Image: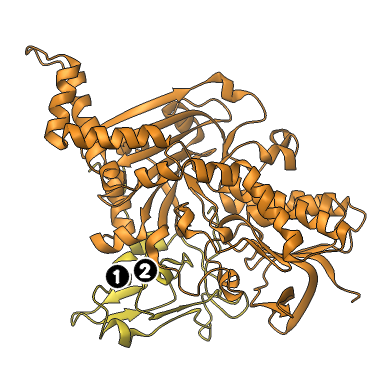
Chain colours: A orange, B yellow
Amino acid sequence: MEDKFDCIIVGGGIAGLSAAMVLARANMRFLLIERGEFCGSKNVSGGVLWGTDLARLVPEYWEDEDAGFERFINHRRLTFMDEQSSFSVDFKSAHYEEQPYSGVTVLRAKFDNWFSEKVQEAIDASDVADESFLVPNVLVEEILKEDGKVVGIRAGEETFYADCVILAEGINNLLTRQIGLQPAYIPADYVAVGAKEVIRFDRKVLEDRFQLSERSGMSNEFVGYASGGVEGGGFLYTNLDSVSIGIILGMKDLRGKKRTPYDVLNEFKAHPAVTDMLRGGEVLEYAAHAVSMGDLRGLPSEIYADGVMLVGEAANLLLNSGKAIQGMDYAMRSGILAAGTTIEAKAEGDFSAAMLKTYRTLLEESFVLQDMRTFQGAVQVLHSPQMFGTVPNLICDFGRQFFTVDSEPTKKASQMMKDSVKRHSSLWEMIKLGTKAARSL
Amino acid sequence: MSADVKQLSISERLGFVSYRNQGRSDAKAHIEVDTSICNSVCPHKCTTYMCPAKCYTLDEQGQVHFQVEDCIECGTCMYACDQGAVTWRYPDPETGLGVTWNLG
């Protein structure tokens, strides 16, 4: 077939664009289809892009004057909250100022758009510049199969064929379900909803308030009061001249507790510690999106089949181990590995499931599935009810005792801790949870 | 609550969202909801409080209503509804509704 591509990529988010970048550099002929007006126009993230893969795909991207990222992270904070107090673990290091950065904040409509321009440049520089395309504004409605093998896609009246298809369609993976790699109905158990606002500040105000230098930034995750009693947590990230503030709430728990995402967000914003950070800001955008909870039980039955591979959140790849919320770096690496497998398959002239299994093997060997497996215990501890109620309340109660100086005789810290434990839980409960947490991290 | 940090209502929040084909009266709905299921057998009517864009509302009689115009394509209702009332598709870029995020 004359106009058959080597690969069709469905979705121009980070996973799809990362795959496209690798294919372009290898002179492969591909078609990337994005349903939004431009790449990034349908994407929502917290969001920090962790890890160093971006520097592999776009070397020295930080030198690019219009680089799509906001700030690099050199300051991290984890905050436990009760209604009135916040108790933070805070880490800042000049180590993180070395390039390549290990985390950058992004706004997806900006970042993905920039990234797609970089991919287009790579296409233009390839040997097959006129035979690979990034096409926005088109919706893929159907995956075409012949004899059980994926052979192409249909968009409206048009059909396109390729040796293989990479599905990078995100968490709401309707095509993945269409070809039977996930059931048609996915229950709320392992899915959360994120809701956020981007709040603008004068750049100088932002830098002074958060102690930022020209391009450095802070990431802050919140546990406890932030999620309004629902399984989940909050986040605040600094962009160039705005902050992204939001919450992530487990859908099943949200349904049971009859809470509303934007009400929980309002309460979080009204917490005294958060209010102090947001004072004087101006809301630019409100957004929300479903997000995978990174529970291995929520993964598709398989991430490859004859002629097809799943990447990024279409494969439910995500991890919140309590140390960081990682999704975009998983999208990036899975896209890179699926593209690498495509190149290998092309050389072999074999796009069967047996060949594409290579992708699964590579992903298993990479940090993506290694970490998802290593920290699966942590994911489950984090989602236990104590972690968003009892524990943050207890920590804040202890903090209040420890840091209060009120001209009364003061107890020793160990006694304060015992009192806090007694008020909010029991020693036995905390030993059990502490042991589990220590093992899982 | 400090007056310096503005608390927004959901309609104010949605005012910041850029929608596609907003003016088109013939725009095709990408989500269909069989509200007869919501209003007969559903024990929780959870979309009325879980939808982050308040596309699902309850009237005074406790009946569920759905409008697609404010939908931001988050996907929440597709998972939240465990009664089979929600049929979810992606909006067609030409003839459908949906969002274009400015920041995302």
The disc label shown at residue B80, or none: 2
Q: Residue furthest left?
A: A408
Say which amino acid is labelled 1.
Answer: Cys
Q: Chain of mark 2?
A: B
Q: Secondary structure at mark 1?
A: loop
Residue that mark 1 sits on: B46
Q: Assign a secondary structure to mark 2.
A: helix
Q: Is residue A31 depicted above or below A48 in this figure?
A: below
The amino acid at mark 2 is Ala
Identify the residue shown where x is 87% and y is 59%. Answer: A348
Left or right: residue A189 versus residue B41 is right
The front one of A215 and A311 is: A311
Where is residue A316 drawn, in percent x and y?
53, 57
- Circles 1 and 2: CB atoms closer than 8 Å: yes
Q: Is residue A426 visible?
A: yes
Q: Residue placed at 87% from the left, 63% from the top?
A: A349
Residue A249 in the image, given as x and y percentages of width and height: 36, 54
- At x 45%, y 41%, the residue is A321
Q: Name the residue located 39 percent from the left edge and 80 percent from the top edge.
A: B84
Q: Are marks 1 and 2 on the same chain?
A: yes
Judge whether A54 appears above or below A309 on screen: above
